Amino acid sequence: MNYNWSNYKILIVDDEPLVIDYFKEVLSVTKIKTLFAKNGKEAVSFVKTNKDIDLVLLDIRMPVMNGFEVFKKIRKIRSSLPIIAQTAYAFSDDKDKILEAGFNDYITKPINNESLYEKISDFIGDRS
């Protein structure tokens, strides 16, 4: 499946350089515009200053501010912005906690390319 998301912008929040490199590589084929924040404070700032962000991929475990704190702050700025949690935890309690917090969805690490594309396409974009 080919994805053309050239009209969309995504904010990826992760403090791991390898994860950021992964997203750059995997999302480049979709032509989506990407912003990268390496901590929660930076992520909140990006959301405040970039009103055209269409989706946020938010790591739960980060320095400065954890994903749940970041989520709450982003929701105060843009209540309807879709936010997908990224987590290395695949236990059902963790999934429940993420969804109960109000995240739109979650994806577990290591991230599968096709799963990532499917999760994103649930909230934005056209398939071609």
Image: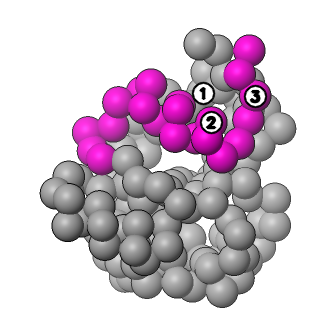
Residue on which the image places disc 1 = 28
**Residues at discs 3 and 1 in contact (Cβ within 8 Å):** no
The circle drawn on residue 121 is: 2
Between 92 and 70, the residue placed more toward the observer is 92
Q: CA distance from mark 2 to mark 1?
A: 15 Å
Name the secondary structure under disc 2: helix
Camera sees residue 25: no
**Rendered position, 27 above or below 13:** above
Picture residue at 81% right of the left edge, 67% below the top: 51
The circle drawn on residue 16 is: none
Camera sees residue 7: yes
Q: Amino acid at mark 3?
A: Asp
Q: CA distance from mark 2 to mark 3?
A: 7 Å
Between 78 and 61, the residue placed more toward the observer is 78
Q: CA distance from mark 3 to mark 1?
A: 15 Å
Characterize the local packing of mark 2: few (<14), some (14-19) or many (20 or more) Cα atoms within 10 angstroms. some
Q: Amino acid at mark 1?
A: Ser
Mark 2 or 1: the one toward you: 2
Name the secondary structure under disc 3: strand
Residue on which the image places disc 3 = 126
Is residue 112 shown in magenta? yes
Mark 3 or 1: the one toward you: 3
Is residue 72 shown in magenta? no
**Residues at discs 2 and 1 in contact (Cβ within 8 Å):** no
Q: Amino acid at mark 2?
A: Ser
Q: Is residue 97 left or right of residue 28?
A: left
Q: Position of residue 28 (x, y in %)?
A: 60, 27
Q: Which residues are magenta?
A: 108-128
**Rendered position, 28 above or below 61:** above
Picture residue at 53% right of the left edge, 60% below the top: 104
